[in-house]
Image: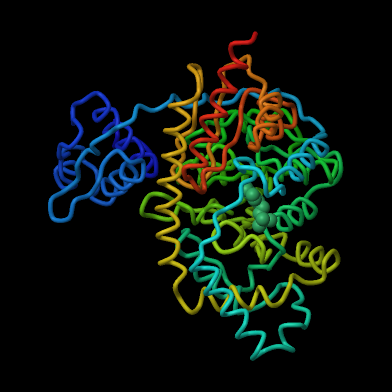
Amino acid sequence: MISSTPKTLRYQELADRLAEFIRHGTYPPGERIPSVRQTSKQQGLSISTVLQAYSLLESQGLIEARPQSGYYVHAQIAERLPEPETSSPQHDPSLISLHELVMRLMHDSSNPNLVHLGAALPTIDSLMTQKINRIIANIARQKGEEAHQYQFPPGLESLRVQIARRAVNAGCNLFPSDILITSGGVDAIDLCLHAVCSPGDIVAIESPSYFGTLQILEVHGLRALEIPTHPRDGISLTALEFAIEHNPIRAVMVIPNFNNPLGSLMPDEKKEALVNLLARHDIPLIENDVSGELYFGDKRPTVCKAFDTKGLVMLLSSFSKDISPGLRIGWVAPGRYRAEVEWLKFTLSASSPTLPQMAIAEFLESGGYDQIMRRTRREYARNVRLMSDAVMRYFPEGTRCTRPSGGFVLWVQLPENVDSLELYGLALQGKITLAPGHVFSATYQFSNFIRLNAASFDYATERAIERLGAMVVELAARR
Ligand SMILES: Cc1ncc(COP(=O)(O)O)c(C=O)c1O
């Protein structure tokens, strides 16, 4: 029953249901689907929920809007691969030792002669870059000396003002004084873990988890407790609650919006339930929202921090995925841990670079961000769809693939007997990189998974996916 479902899921459910109708020919290619108003009436859903569902279907390439005429089923509709199932990690916390493999991947990802499907690099938008470069040149001319001075924590005020203003779109009331500027998301994750954990402590994380997070846990000698996670709506709260009751968990770390590598999006009700669960146990939540701006629907998703009444949520993000990874600017709103995080930031790195803070503040203030991001989101939605269509065309039976509604990575499950490290070696010989599933788990859970970067998609990408598919077919047939 749609109406008893959490609001964020409702539009996804409606989109899924309509997608099924389209695939089964209830609405054949080229035919008009019911209008927004009709569907809203039939399904007892608000106009905005229906619009969100239609916009998701549009971004998935299933329907198209025709001006003054309505929504039509796309002429060619591809079948879709099944999704991976909820993960089932080991029950015990584990120390991590992934650095050798991660460093190997990092070096390979810097080789300019390869097709890079591994590292989660965003596309660099030329208009965005031109604007930022102009702003940097102006600042260097007009505020040259100021731009060379330290910018001690909490960081540049005008940037914190812009971040606080934008946080409202994520349902979050932050004051500039709640925010500390960091050197990207990695610095923010590191500071949060440093502030609330000591070596040997247990941190509950999603399964799979972004390998950068696992690396920071490794550096701090922390133990990871991997919690079952669904590729559509994120970490299992039942499993997390069970884990909390049986382990002295010191912190929980999640990526609720467009998780890397799953692309999962936690519905609002689940975010609220997570915050309440941790509040009952007085456990800090480190919330990583670096991809929150990369939504394919028409509304920016909420953050867990919006439901935080006890100051336990440490919300962090960065400008690496939307503006520029090279400027290395991120931020954190650490709630009740603000003083510790500020002290750590000052002690460990004194300041984040001043000129990039000034440039991002001015770019956000002077406008243009939203317009460019609308186009970027459309491109990512399109490229994610094109890449998942290509995976379906070229990979063998038994392959599964996520269906993200934001971000730009795909998580692909290969037939069980295919080892993704072996595939990695073959792919490298064929001048392609990918991210093998091994690095997304403390306990090497995902040996037959790969993460693909779908930020851009062109002829060379399609051919690379075709070659990868042939390698997977060969490996699957071998044993
Ligand atoms: C989930 C997640 N968190 C953090 C980061 C790192 O962000 P930054 O480059 O801003 O340090 C990345 C980069 O890929 C990421 O995917």
Q: Quadrant of the N terminus?
A: top left
The mark total stands at 0
Q: Does 148 appear above or below 20? A: below
Closer to the camera, 246 or 89? 89
Can residue 289 be seen by looking at this rendering? Answer: no
Q: Does 243 appear above or below 136? A: above
Quadrant housing residue 240: top right
Colour mode of the rendering: rainbow
| Residue visible at 62% across and 43% down in the picture | 116
Closer to the camera, 218 or 279? 218
Percent position (x, y) of residue 245? 68, 30
Percent position (x, y) of residue 73? 22, 38
Percent position (x, y) of residue 434? 64, 36
Closer to the camera, 93 or 184? 184
Q: Is residue 354 left or right of residue 476?
A: right
Q: Residue furthest bottom?
A: 142
Q: Is residue 355 left or right of residue 41?
A: right
Can residue 273 be seen by looking at this rendering? Answer: yes
